[in-house]
Image: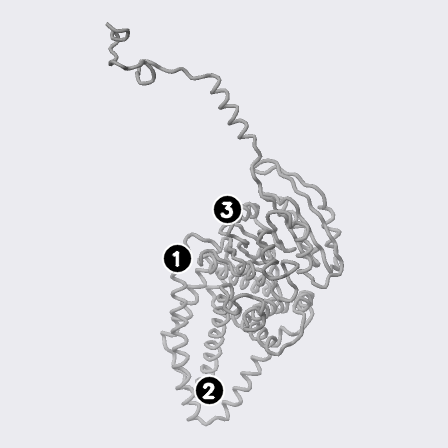
Amino acid sequence: MGQHEGIGLAPGTVPGLEDPRYVRMPDPSLEAYAEEFLGAVDELPTLRPTVGCVIPAYNEAETIAGVLDSLLQQTRLPDAIHLVVNNTSDDSVEIASHYAGPHTRMTPTGEQSTVIYVHDIGKNPDKKVGALNYGYSLVEHMDYLLGVDGDTTPEPDAIQHLVDEISSDDRIGGISAIYSIDDSALDGLMPKFLIAGQRAQFSAFNMQNLLKGRNMAVLGGQFSIFSTQALRDVMRDSHQRTPWVSDSEVEDSLLSLQIKSAGYLTKISARARAHVGGMTTLRSLDAQQVKWNFGAIDLMWPGQRGDTKGQPFHPNLRLRWFEHLSMVVNMASRIMFLVLLIGALTIDAFVFQAWWLIPPLAAVWLNFRVAHSMEFANRRDYLFVLLVFPAELYMFIRMGHFVRAWLKFFSRQQTDNWAAQAKAERGKGVAWTYPFVALGVFFVAAGIAWQQVPIQTTSDLLELGWPILGVITVLQTVWMLIKASKRYRGFKA
């Protein structure tokens, strides 16, 4: 009998792991090494992208403390915060100086630190653009630049969401937060009305971009994060010394366009939110909206910016063209309806048709869905929509801004729209009244002319005008119904 025959092993089998009766004992030295190795791995520092925050500030004494407080309460603090005060005539520097220096706080991920620097660069001919470029020179060695306006307060997790999103994909050159306007501390009917209109305007714009693959044509300067590598590529490709240039009315739109042209993606965040400053007077709203529209036209119009690749039909500009064409249609339908309605009433030829209620009901449904999509919707947002008149009145105000911007562009007026906005916010200037005066003059002149036209001619004009308006209105209604039927896929504007 062989050596192993007594325990029933097959011939040629060597006892070891193959035999279930044999159990190999763990090597204590290997276990100790594994524990030591895993412990050393856990102690390795986690890669943490660096973020430099730049806040261009001009006369922000009323809001700058709130902005800095909101940044210091973030779950992810910036590595440095540079407040760049320029051309100021108030107490912005004095108020901000109380925040200067290092700050440390405990966050859900552990203790974090940042340093706030306050820079008063005095008179600066390039205004906000100059302040942004000055700030860029201070943080260009970091991974990301976070641009924050001096009246913008982010939600506590906003920076964390922006950093997580932009660091997850090297193709992304910049990401904008979802913007809204805080309306909790408003007094007076006019400010409440104007802010409700701006909230609806922001919400519709945000949702439109969220549903288009979260592609954002404009990385708004209010609260956006940029890859500094993307900014360097823009300067190289566009032969610029700085990321922002002063020869555009909308510096953020131009930079976004250039980032896209450099091969990067421009996105809107699905979660990061920030509350921006709104315009509470007709004068200040007019100046802001005219500046924005004028700057957009400057980018869109053929030959205006020969240095912009793909202009005027660059991917970031197609949406702008569509917005302006939509405004033209809105203007045409509303003015035609008023003219035809008044004309029909003057000759007792008006006959109400029930189906005329379909277009306004479609508009209410669409606007209701926009209001319902707001993350922080309130009773005032719903009343703005359901009462119909406020939303229509705000649309007429926007039409005035639109016309003023195009007239300024075609007249080639050499005006400083930044200065005009600052002047309007101080309560000066009368340009905001021009659209209302022009509309009034138009209807007076049309009324006088109408009285001089023979009754047969007026009847013929009405007979021709109503079908044309009907076709336009049907197309608008179909488009509104399509937009109102879209699924929002869980997004909140």
* Residue denoted by label 3: 168
Q: Are marks 2 and 3 in contact (CB under 8 Å)?
A: no
Left/right of residue 113 with respect to residue 212 in the rendered view: right
Q: Earlier in the sequence, mark 1 or mark 2?
A: 2
Near-viewer residue (52 or 240): 240
Q: Quadrant for residue 17, please give it.
A: top left
Identify whether 164 is placed above or below 370: above
Task: Report x, y in % for residue 465.
Answer: 42, 84
Q: Which mark is residue 346?
A: 2
For label 3, the SS is loop
Residue in front for this viewpoint, 474 or 240:
240
Crowd tier of the residue under label 3, counting other residues whose Cα lies within 10 Å: few below 14, some 14–19, many 20 or above: few
Q: Which residue type does callout 2 highlight? A: Thr
Q: Position of residue 480 (x, y in %)?
A: 41, 67
State how far apart marks 3 and 1 are (Cα). 27 Å
Task: Name the kind of residue labelled 3 in the image.
Answer: Ser
Gap in angstroms between the C-alphas marked 2 and 3: 65 Å
First in sequence: mark 3 or mark 1?
3
Task: Name the residue beneath numbered marker 1.
Answer: 487
